[in-house]
Amino acid sequence: MSGGVGEQAAVGPAIEALGIINRFGSQTVHDGLDMSVVPGEVFGIVGGSGSGKSVLLRTILGLHRPQGGEVRFFGTDLTRLSDRELRAVKAQYGVTFQAGALFSSLTVLQNVQLPMIEHLQLPPRALDELAMLKVRLVGLPAEAAWKFPAQLSGGMVKRAALARALALDPRLLFLDEPTSGLDPIGAASFDELVMGLQRELALTIVMITHDLDSIFRTCNRVGVIVDRKMVSGTLAEIAENPHPWIQSYFHGDRARRFEVSHGA
């Protein structure tokens, strides 16, 4: 993976959040938060409850306009785009949300087709074939395409949501708590799927997660939201940061299993 990152790094960051300020009434959630994601890497975002992880994701995706700062995708400032221009940019990324966010009245295949119908001009047969390709890409059996979300296991729902996120062959993939609700074996299997797709499709991935095992398995770098700002670095660098919350999160039995908690 590192070779691909180095080759693309010359074009600049894939994602930049510069001086982000988010306030809700008298509460300041982010105060000058900076984040930069290198093309081709898997970047994890962690933080305590109420630190604004979901607000940051919505800000990056252009779903929430911050009170201050800029969000850039490959150099384009999303905060200054019109709704029409932003719609075109949104076709460049895919998103999965914590609960899957599939439409319960639609089959898996129909869910995967939704972004295609919105952005592509394809006849029905081509839509079916392309959507089925995405279903198989995430490791779902063909028969799952005709099932409704309520007929799927939790792990299959995650994979179906991932298939929809990949519907338009995005450059960027955002995963919101991708392993939440999965048992350890299911979570490890999903992580392996994500890493395989990242390599195969040359994706840049931003992952919000509280799953420390998943962070160690998948992430090149991590951004930790503390004190309304972000501290970023490799896992080894973050583990050495003296901030009390970072120390309490990254040092412990699970961290020691991955030999990151030096001298803990």
Image (spheres, rainbow, N blue to C red):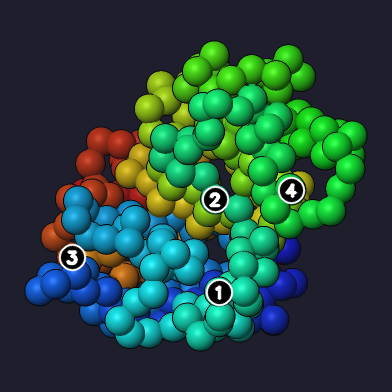
Task: Kindly identify which residue carries mark 1.
Answer: 83
Secondary element type, mark 4: helix
**How far across and down, in percent of the image, does residue 64 sit?**
39, 68
Position of residue 133 in the picture relative to residue 222 (left or right):
right
Q: Mark 2 or mark 4, which is nearer to you?
A: 4
Task: Kindly identify which residue carries mark 3.
Answer: 243
Question: Is mark 3 in CB contact (under 8 Å) with mark 2?
Answer: no
**How far across and down, in percent of the image, does residue 201 sit?**
75, 51
Residue drawn at x 54%, y 50% as measured from the top left: 95
Identity of the amino acid at label 4? Answer: Met
Q: Where is the N terminus found, in terms of image quarters?
A: bottom right
Identity of the amino acid at label 1? Answer: Asp
Task: Kindly identify which residue carries mark 4.
Answer: 116
Task: Kindly identify which residue carries mark 2.
Answer: 95
Q: Mark 1 or mark 3, which is nearer to you?
A: 1
For marks 1 and 3, the one nearer the N-term is 1
For marks 3 and 4, the one nearer the N-term is 4
Identity of the amino acid at label 3? Answer: His
Position of residue 126 in the picture relative to residue 11 (left or right):
right
Identity of the amino acid at label 2? Answer: Val
Q: How far apart, in angstroms, are the residues tagged by discs 2 and 4?
A: 14 Å
For marks 3 and 2, the one nearer the N-term is 2
- Give the camera-side residue of 98 and 121: 121
Q: Mark 3 or mark 2, which is nearer to you?
A: 2
Q: How far apart, in angstroms, are the residues tagged by discs 2 and 1?
A: 19 Å
